[in-house]
Image (cartoon, rainbow, N blue to C red):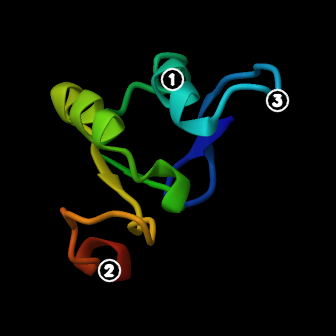
Amino acid sequence: MAVADSAGLPVAVCADTATPHEVTLVQQTLSETFVAEFIERLIGDSAYDSDRLDHDLAETGVQIIAPHRCIRKIRIQDGRALRR
């Protein structure tokens, strides 16, 4: 898994097997950051729509921006941050 900045330059990289889901690798990847800048927002696809991930990243000060999965009953994002 890799995290890139707005210019497409890599910020963090983590290699693992193909077995774990991406959501479980986010914290591990963010701990492997090799730049001094603090990550403020993380944009992902609908696989990143997880209450646990939202809570864990909010504790570290990172805002997750991801479209809701179709099965989500309580919507916590209205999509404005994703359209910016």
Indicate left or right for 47 with 37 as reference: right
Q: How many marks?
A: 3
Residue 41 in the image: x percent, y percent? 32, 50
Report helix, strand or loop for mark 1: loop
Indicate left or right for 77 with 36 as reference: left
- Distance from Cα at disc 3 to Cα at disc 2: 32 Å
Q: Measuring 76% from the left and 21% from the top, which residue is drawn there?
A: 15
Q: Mark 1 highlights which residue?
A: 33
Q: Mark 2 highlights which residue?
A: 84
Q: Measuring 40% from the left and 61% from the top, which residue is drawn there?
A: 66
- Circle 3 or circle 2, nearest the eye: 3
Q: Amino acid at mark 3?
A: Ala
Residue 11 in the image: x percent, y percent? 55, 36
* Snapshot quadrant of residue 75: bottom left
Q: Amino acid at mark 2?
A: Arg
Q: Amino acid at mark 1?
A: Thr
Q: Measuring 31% from the left and 34% from the top, which residue is drawn there?
A: 52
Q: Measuring 18% from the left and 62% from the top, which residue is drawn there?
A: 76
Q: Mark 3 highlights which residue?
A: 18
**Quarter of the picture holding the N terminus:** top right
Report crowding for label 3: few under 14, some 14 to 19, many 20 or more residues within 10 A (C-alpha): few
